[in-house]
Image (cartoon, grey):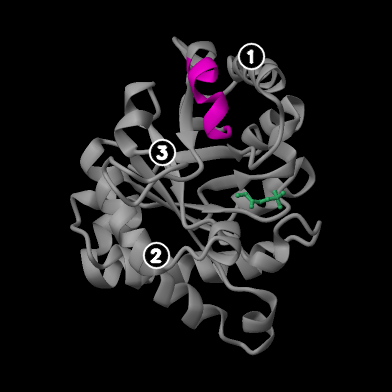
């Protein structure tokens, strides 16, 4: 059964008290949500512990935005997967384009991080997506196919039960320029085929594939109406509980 998910990536925004207030507002409003839609929030590392407390007993799941590529040890400034699970994190985002672009995150590193996360019992939201230059050169299908294969083809069909894919075209992130529903749908269908080729039709059919990039209440309905778009990974609009919930109510 395919799950619908709306996940909020807070990126490097809000202080801890502001984040706690935002989480409280999300929990309060999430009570109206239908049972088949899962809400996830991904605050900065510093916020995870107090936000976990706010989410206790609610339907809202907690995600990190990244994890270390080592289990433990002398890696100053890094956060290990068991630190995340020990405070109640259920997910981690991996391979966000901002991490690929600014912090040298490679597909090879993402394989290691995905291995560690899955082994620790974390679900992975793996981000893929082409930049503007790649889209203008007509390479978007190739880029997204390669990113998906390079990481996920190292895993098993069983592992795929704990993987969500987020298609985030880099040119649509934070720019106000959303991919049209048709543009997003054709990439989502391509990603589902890539999954089907390796893991079979059932695994592909069950895979949740999110769209991210200037998704907001005004365009969510059209995007989510597509048959291969199973929710969203939301940046800016996730910082306002009303907007975030309005997106979640767009199925
Ligand atoms: P925006 O919704 O701000 O475009 O960000 C999308 C994103 O990068 C979510 O991970």
Residue 41 visible to the viewer: no
How far apart are the alpha carbons under marks 1 and 2?
A: 35 Å
Say if 215 sits above or below 8 in the image.
Answer: below
Q: Which residues are magenta?
A: 43-52
- Nearer to the camera, 42 or 205: 42
Marks 3 and 2, the one that precedes in the sequence:
3
Is label 2 in a helix, a strand or a loop? helix
Q: Is 108 placed left or right of 36 in the picture? A: left
- What percent of the width, then of the height, locates residue 164? 40, 49
Marks 1 and 2, the one that precedes in the sequence:
1
Residue on which disc 2 sits? 192
Tag nearer the camera, 1 or 2? 1
Q: Is 112 placed left or right of 178 in the picture? A: left
Ligand 1 has an atom within 8 Å of the beta carbon of the residue at disc 2: no
- Numbered mark located on residue 24 in the image: 1
- What percent of the width, then of the height, locates residue 148? 39, 68
Which quarter of the rendered picture does the C terminus lie within? top right
Q: Residue furthest bottom?
A: 137
């Amino acid at each position: 059964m395919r799950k619908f998910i709306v996940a909020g990536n807070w990126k490097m925004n809000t202080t801890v008290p502001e984040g706690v207030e935002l989480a409280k507002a999300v929990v309060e409003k999430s009570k109206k949500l239908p049972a088949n839609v899962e809400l996830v929030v991904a605050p900065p590392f510093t916020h995870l512990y107090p936000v976990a407390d706010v989410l206790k007993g609610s339907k809202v799941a907690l995600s990190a935005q990244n994890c270390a590529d080592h289990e433990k040890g002398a890696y100053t400034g890094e956060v290990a997967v068991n630190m995340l699970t020990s405070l109640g994190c259920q997910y981690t985002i991996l391979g966000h384009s901002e991490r690929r672009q600014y912090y040298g995150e490679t597909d090879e590193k993402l394989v290691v991080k995905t291995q560690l996360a899955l082994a620790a019992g974390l679900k992975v939201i793996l981000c893929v997506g082409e930049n503007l230059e790649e889209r203008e050169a007509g390479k978007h299908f190739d880029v997204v196919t390669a990113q998906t294969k390079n990481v996920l083809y190292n895993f098993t069909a069983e592992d795929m039960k704990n993987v969500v894919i987020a298609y985030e075209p880099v040119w649509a992130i934070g720019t106000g320029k959303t991919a049209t529903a048709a543009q997003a749908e054709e990439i989502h269908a391509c990603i589902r085929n890539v999954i089907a080729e390796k893991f079979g039709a059932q695994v592909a059919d069950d895979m949740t594939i999110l769209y991210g990039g200037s998704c907001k209440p005004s365009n969510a309905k059209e995007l989510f109406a597509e048959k291969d778009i199973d929710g969203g990974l939301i940046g800016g609009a996730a910082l306002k509980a009303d907007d975030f919930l309005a997106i979640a109510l767009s199925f």
